[in-house]
Every structure is written in C-alpha cells, then in structure tokens.
Image (cartoon, rainbow, N blue to C red):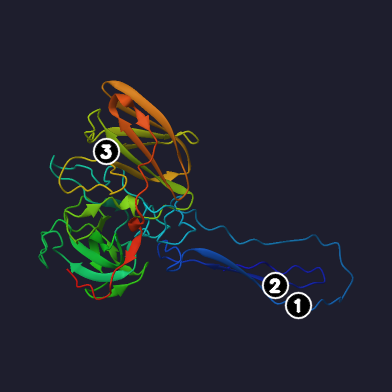
Amino acid sequence: MTGFNKVTVTLKVTVTLIVLTSCAPAVYGVSPTAVFAGETAAPQEVQLDAPPTPEPFRLTLPTPGAEPVSGWRPPLYPVPWALSPYDHFYFVRPIAADEVNWPLPDYRYGGIFFAGNIVHTGVDIDAPQGTPVYAAGPGTVVWADWGLFSETPGNQSDPYGLAVAIRHDFGYQGQQLYTVYAHMSKITTVVGQHLNTGDQLGLVGSTGATTGPHLHFEVRYPNNSFHDTYNPELWIAPPEGWGVLVGRLTDNKNKTLQQLEVFVKSETTNEMRVIKTYGGGGAINHDPYYDENLVLGDLPAGVYRLTLRFDDKDQQTWVEIFPGQVTYFTFKGTDGFDTTRPPAPKLDFLPTAIPTDTPAP
C-alpha cells in the first residue's frame, strides 16, 4: 500500500488509504468483492512550533496500478438478483472479475460445432491455463472427477474432461438447480464438500474435448443431466452497468429460426457483436417465461441497433439495454420486430429453498 507523504505546514497529518481487493469472483454480498474503504487516523494535536513558511504544498500520489484486463465489473446488487419475478440472476461468474469473463462469441449456449447434431449446452469462458475457477453459488459438490458426461467416474475419454458439479442450496420453481464446471486442469474440491459462493473448486484447463484452455459452464434444472441445461447467461448476474438481450425469432408460422445471424451494434461506440440463434436439438431447453432462442449477456447499458436478414431482406430495429435488466424482443417473419414482453408469470417463478435432506442424484 502507498500512503500520502507528510506535508509540513506546521500541521502533521497522516492519512492511510487501505485498498481491499479479492481474487474471488463477483460475489455480490455473499463473499468478498473488490471494495474500497478509507480509514482516517485519529486527529493529531496541532503544534505551532514555528511560523508558516512559503514552501509550496507538495503531495506524492501512489503509482497507478496496471490497467484491468477487461471492462467487466461486479454488480453492486446482491445475488440472487431480479427486478421482476420472471428473471433469475441467481449465480455469479465463475472466473474472477480481473479476467475477461464472458462467453466466447462462437461458443454460446445453443451453438452447433463440429457436426450438425452436436449442440452446445453451456457457455465457454476463455481464460489462461491454471486460472482459478470459483463456485457460482452455495451448494454441495456432487461430482468431482472425470466422466461427468458418460456418468462413469474416472473415464478419461469423457468429453467434459475433469469436471465438477454442484447441487445448490436453493432451487427454482420448487426443484433443484445445478451448475457444472468442465475441462479443468485440476480439481481442488471433493464430493460431499459444501462450497460457498466464490470458493475455489479447481483450475482452468483443456482436458476432454477441447481445442485450448477455457471453462465450460452449465446451469442444469431440475436434474444433473446433459438434457436438462438452460442458457447460463439468463442465470448469471450481469456486470455493473450492463444488461442482457433476450430474443425469440421465428418465421410467420411461429417456427423458430435456427442459427440466424443477428448483428448488434452500439449506437454510442459503434462496436458490433454478432450472435446466432439456437440450433436444433433435443438438448436445448428454453426459459419457461421468455421461450427464447437468442441471449446476449455482455452488453453495456445503451441503445443498440439490431439487424438481421430474412427472406432476402435486411430487417432492423433499435433496443435499449438497462443495467441489471433483461431487454426482450421478438421477430416474427414479415411481421417484423416487437418489444412487448410476455405476460407476467405467477409468483412461483421466485427462487425457493430446497430441503437440506434432499438426496443427491
């Protein structure tokens, strides 16, 4: 820590600036996050030893630290977080806030890679080999080994590689929630261990079916199964000042448009993001409220222009992203865009406690 130098103007004051930081991910009220606290020393007695001199006021400031890797910042609100009963930002991000911490553009939920029938059931977060991986919420470890996909402990040919699954202390609509962390180089937890939000559970690696180091992260409900996944970007609390774009895109017969490119351009920075709608496949599940087939969860608040091509014509509209909120839109063929939200759900969309004696799967 670096403090202010003493300034002699017949009054000696010492101010200590304490900066508290944590390598843990954003924990939003459950575990430490990066915070700043200032403590001022007790007032010192003023001693008039000599008349003031005309010596100029001098102040030595601390040397600035390195610039952060990304613009990502933990939210100021606690998790679980939701402005309305149909949202469920129950989890924090599993990589620390000082690292790039959002899904790789081409490896989001619902994408299709390698073959036409392989659908991505989570999000991939790029991070260097050995980066710590943290629990996204409190719960009990129910898997910590190779073989999660095949459900065969020790199976080193399993595509998930070294993986951890957590059964969380809270549920959704009265049923269980799980999170999965895959492709790790090392696991630092054991089955049966209870983890709090932000506790380390392993290190980023490239075990299993990967092309390089990254973390594969899933949200599962109500079973710890490959076929019970939902889009994690609807469950992870947005960074401070950022929001989530959610869409349902169909043709005029209400058939979902698969792997359709949507261009999302900021009207402030002109930055362009490209995202595709979900592919087909039985492993993809849609949110009970939004019934979406597109989610983009890394958008700073502001106005964005959406552009897509349908029936050989460019279609576009504008949406506004709000901090900590979901912005919803639909596109229905030649009927175009609409920003009307679905009807409000019942209050049973709120999180519910799961009995502690619920047996593990």
The residue at which mark 3 appears reads as 277
The residue at which mark 1 appears reads as 44
User: Counting residues from the N terminus, which is met first, the one under dot 1 or under dot 3?
Assistant: 1
- Viewport quadrant of the C terminus: bottom left
Cβ atoms under marks 2 and 1 closer than 8 Å? yes
Q: Could you say which disc has been placed on residue 14 in the image?
A: 2
Residue placed at 74% from the left, 76% from the top?
A: 43
Q: Position of residue 305 (x, y in %)?
A: 42, 32
Q: Residues within 10 Å of mark 3 (few under 14, many from 20)?
A: many
- The span from disc 2 to disc 3 (Cα, nearest Å) is 58 Å
* Viewer-side residue, 229 vs 337: 337
Residue type at mark 3 is Thr
| Residue 205: quarter of image | bottom left
* Viewer-side residue, 232 vs 361: 361
Residue 87 located left or right of residue 68: left
Q: Where is residue 116 in the image (x, y as percent from the top left)?
A: 13, 39
Q: Which residue lies furthest to the right in this view?
A: 51
